[in-house]
Each structure stands twice: as C-alpha cells, then as structure tokens.
Image (cartoon, rainbow, N blue to C red):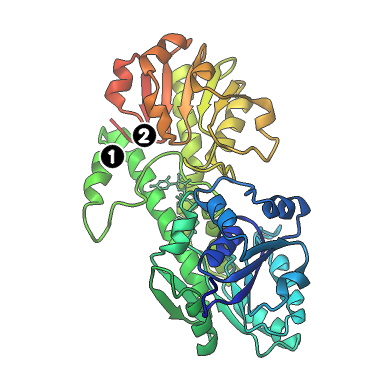
C-alpha cells in the first residue's frame, strides 16, 4: 500500500551505495527508479539479480518490485521524480583529487525533471562540492531545486541494517525546505536526523572515517611495540577499550584496512587539505602505518622461512574483510604481489572473494577448500578473518603441510592451541 508521505525518487548509480539506497527507500514505501549506465547491470537487476554479495539486499530488491525499477535512461528515471539521489562513484583523478565528472553529468541531466524539488548527494565528495553543484543547478535554471549532502555511513556486510537502523542520518542543507524534505524521506527510519550546513556534513563523513583509520593504525603501532616488549595487544586493547571514553571498536591489530572507503577517503581528505596548503601530519602517518602493515608481516614470515624463493605459500582469505566478496584495495593484493615478487608459489582460498582485476591473481592458484590449498605448503598467512578458519582441524592441517608455519594476520586463532597443533605460529602484537 502506498504511504501518503511516499515520494517519487530517481537514484543515479546502481553501485554498492546506489543499490542499497534505492532498495531501502523502496522498502520505506517510496517509488524508486535506479539508473545506471551499464546495460548488463541494469538487465541483471531488472531480473532481480544483485551483482554482489550483501546480506538482505536481494530480499529487498525482490520484495519491492512494485516500487523499484531499473533503467539505463536518465529521462525515464526522472519522470515524476521529486528527489534525485546521486550515488555515482568519485574515483581519484591523476592529481589524487576526487573525480566529480560523473556527479556533474547527473546534475546536467536534471533539467528534464519538472517536479524535482531536491538533489541529494550520497557519494563521498570533497568539501565545497555542494557549492559547485549549486552553481551548476543555478546556471541550468534550476534555482528552485534544493541541494542536500546526505553522506552514508554504510559498512559492507551490514549495509541494509546501517541504512534502516542508522546511528545518525546527516542532512546537510542550506535551506529548511530541503532539509525538511530529506528528513521526511527517512520518517520511518529508526535513527536520529542531524541537520547541519552542507560544508559540515561533507567534512563529517571524511572525519568519521579518518578517525576510525587512526584507531586501527594506532592499534597496529602499539602491536609492534608489544612485539618488542613481550606484551600482548589483545590484552592491552581489551582493557583500553573498556574505558567508555574510548570504547572497544576499531582497535583490532592486523594487516590493516582496505575496502572501497577507507583507502580512498583517507587520501581524499589529505589531498583536500594539501590543495589548501595544509599538511595533515597525523593522517599522513596513519596512512603510512597502514601501508607498512602487510609488508612488516611478510618480512617477519620471510625471516622465519629464510626467504620465499621456491616456497609454496597459502593465503587464507582475499576479501578486504570477512562477510564480503569485495577485494577493492584489500591488503591481500599487496601480500600476493610481494610473495610473487620474492619467488614464492602462491595458493589462495576465499569463500566469497570476487576477483575483478587479473593481477596479481592470474599468477596464483585458487582453491575451494582451504585444506587442499594447505596440503604440501611451506607456510600460510591468514589475510581475512573468515570465521570458518577457526573450525579447521589444525593438527591435521599441520601434518599435511611441508612445514607447519602460520602467520595469523588477523589474530583470529588461539596461539596456544596452534602451537599445540604443531605450528610455528606468528601473529600481530601477541606474545
Ligand atoms: C567503512 C566504514 O565503517 C563505513 O562507515 C564507511 O561508510 C565506509 O567504510 P567498510 O569499508 O565496509 O566500512 O568496512 P569496515 O567494517 O569499517 O572495515 C574497514 C577495514 O578496517 C577492513 O579492512 C577491516 O578489516 C579493517 N579493520 C577494522 C581493522 O583492521 N581493525 C579494526 O579494528 C576494524
């Protein structure tokens, strides 16, 4: 049944954020048309097939077919549209800035939408993008169309619940009518709407991600100190996180972060500041610590093996985190490339990872069963914290390996149990 407060919405971009946004807005009762420029994607979505793994998303797409459609045609998406969401990607330019050409192309299409009241940008964009879009709208004769920055805080693997039960919904708009309209779209969402100016909304998103990255790099740096002092990072961060002023989240040491957001947003914030002549020293160090993490891990394993040349090494996990098939900017690519460069034969296992780039994966062998990959290997590295690795019979695995050496890059397994199973066991910051 149509909700009287429901709106007609065009969502531009059927990538990760656009699809989650479109499906969740339809679930909230709005009439949504999602537009993408890739024919195969639109065809698959029209058949109800979601092109990536995200819990709960297929159910929303299939359960809202009356209110959710997909198209290649911008004009068709804009028929009757009162709100246009911009969810296209903003990849880095050669100068390292966010490339806004796709965002601007969407804005240029909006002239054909007579009922349009607001443009809402969900893509992560640099501060000042709202001003530029405002000027573009005004030049196109769309001064009556409001602008809102509505950054997403969506973590892969829980994107649907992050949308429908968010900690906060940020609505950055410079006029009340636009802020009211965007807030009203979320009236049935279980989370507080926080209104602010456009610039603050743009910066809030990048700052939140940068602070999470800072926590991870700090934990990783303290983990290194644990290794030289004989302390244990799990114990240290366990009690540090019990302080309610600090909290327990994002203090896990390991091979560092990857994914579609942190690497891109960290560099974008740094770049944005440097365009104004500002050097964000802390953020620079945070990124550097992260880049070093997989390399440090490999150095320790190399010391243990006496070199990688001719060794068979198994990577357990390729996705940038467990629960997703996403390999964008995953530390696994660094691990695989370095191992290959040092002359190792690389085997890998991951239950979901979707390989989209040929390199370095074309030079590795992928297995469906981790035990098969591990048989006859000289070493293994846990790259992604897949919980099923905890269930392996590690004593059996140790017997099947040429040398039972394991570097646990996610501190997933219990050190004492692994040693009892016969392993030379290394991990990050644990005594
Ligand atoms: C993140 C943000 O959480 C989300 O709000 C934003 O919108 C997009 O970026 P996501 O990239 O899906 O989401 O993953 P997240 O679960 O936040 O993990 C990010 C990375 O940090 C992963 O590679 C993870 O393995 C790593 N991580 C996380 C750690 O190394 N240690 C931790 O303690 C937590």
Question: In this orientation, which residue lies closer to the viewer: 6 or 373?
Answer: 6
Can you identify the residue that label 2 sits on? 411
Instruction: Report the side of 56 relative to 165 (left or right).
Output: right
* Residue drawn at (60%, 46%) of the image: 52
Instruction: Report the side of 414 relative to 256 (left or right).
Output: left
- Vertical relation: 306 (above or below) 20: above
Q: Are marks 2 and 1 in contact (CB under 8 Å)?
A: yes
Of the numbered discs in the image, which one, if any, rests on residue 187? none
The location of residue 191, given as percent across then percent down, is: 39, 69
Distance, label 2 to label 1, CA atoms, is: 9 Å
* SS assignment at label 1: helix
Question: In this orientation, which residue lies closer to the viewer: 41 or 219?
Answer: 41
The location of residue 342, given as percent across then percent down, is: 60, 24
* Residue drawn at (53%, 16%) of the image: 372
Question: In this orientation, which residue lies closer to the viewer: 290 or 60?
Answer: 60
Question: In this orientation, which residue lies closer to the viewer: 378 or 143?
Answer: 143
Q: Which quarter of the rendered picture does the C terminus lie within?
A: top left
* Residue drawn at (49%, 55%) of the image: 159
Inspect this view and state whether residue 190 appears: yes
* Residue drawn at (56%, 63%) of the image: 21
Can you identify the residue that label 1 sits on? 234
Structural crowding at the residue carrying mark 1, measured as other residues with C-alpha within 10 Å and reported as few (<14), some (14–19) or many (≥20): many
Structural crowding at the residue carrying mark 2, measured as other residues with C-alpha within 10 Å and reported as few (<14), some (14–19) or many (≥20): many
Q: Is mark 2 within 8 Å of ligand 1?
A: no
- Vertical relation: 83 (above or below) 342: below
């Amino acid at each position: 049944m149509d909700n009287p407060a429901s709106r007609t919405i065009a969502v531009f971009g059927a990538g990760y954020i656009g699809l989650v946004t479109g499906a969740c807005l339809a679930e909230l009762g709005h009439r949504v048309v999602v537009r993408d420029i890739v024919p195969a994607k639109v065809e698959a979505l029209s058949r109800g097939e979601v092109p990536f793994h995200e819990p709960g998303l297929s159910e929303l797409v299939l359960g809202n077919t009356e209110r959710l459609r997909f198209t290649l045609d911008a004009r068709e998406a804009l028929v009757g549209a009162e709100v246009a969401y911009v969810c296209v990607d903003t990849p880095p330019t050669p100068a390292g800035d966010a490339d806004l050409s796709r965002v601007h192309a969407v804005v240029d299409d909006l002239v054909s939408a007579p009922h349009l009241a607001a443009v809402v940008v969900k893509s992560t964009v640099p501060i000042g993008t709202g001003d530029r879009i405002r000027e573009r709208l005004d030049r196109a004769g769309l001064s009556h169309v409001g602008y809102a920055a509505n950054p997403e805080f969506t973590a892969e693997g829980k994107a649907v619940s992050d949308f429908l039960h968010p900690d906060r919904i940020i609505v950055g708009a410079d006029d009340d009518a636009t802020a009211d309209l965007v807030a009203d779209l979320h009236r049935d969402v279980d989370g507080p709407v926080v209104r602010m100016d456009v610039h603050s909304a743009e910066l809030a998103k990048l700052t939140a991600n940068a602070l999470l990255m800072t926590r991870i790099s700090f934990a990783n740096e303290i983990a290194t100190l644990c290794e030289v002092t004989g302390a244990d990072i799990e114990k240290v961060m366990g009690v540090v996180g019990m302080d309610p002023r600090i909290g327990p989240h994002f203090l896990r040491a390991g091979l560092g972060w990857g994914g579609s957001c942190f690497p891109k947003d960290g560099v974008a914030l740094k770049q944005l500041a440097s365009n104004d002549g500002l050097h964000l020293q802390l953020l620079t160090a945070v990124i550097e610590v992260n880049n070093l993490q997989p390399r440090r891990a490999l150095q320790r394993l190399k010391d243990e093996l006496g070199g990688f040349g001719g060794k068979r090494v198994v990577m357990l996990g390729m996705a940038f985190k467990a629960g997703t098939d996403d390999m964008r900017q995953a530390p696994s690519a660094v691990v695989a490339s370095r191992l290959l460069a040092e002359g190792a034969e690389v085997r890998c296992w991951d239950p979901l990872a979707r390989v989209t780039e040929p390199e370095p994966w074309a030079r590795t062998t992928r297995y469906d069963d981790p035990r098969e990959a591990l048989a006859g290997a000289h070493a293994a590295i846990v790259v992604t914290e897949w919980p099923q690795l905890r269930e392996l019979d590690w004593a059996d695995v140790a017997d099947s390996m040429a040398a039972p050496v394991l570097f646990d890059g996610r501190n997933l397994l219990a050190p004492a149990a692994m040693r009892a199973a016969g392993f030379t066991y290394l991990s990050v910051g644990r005594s």
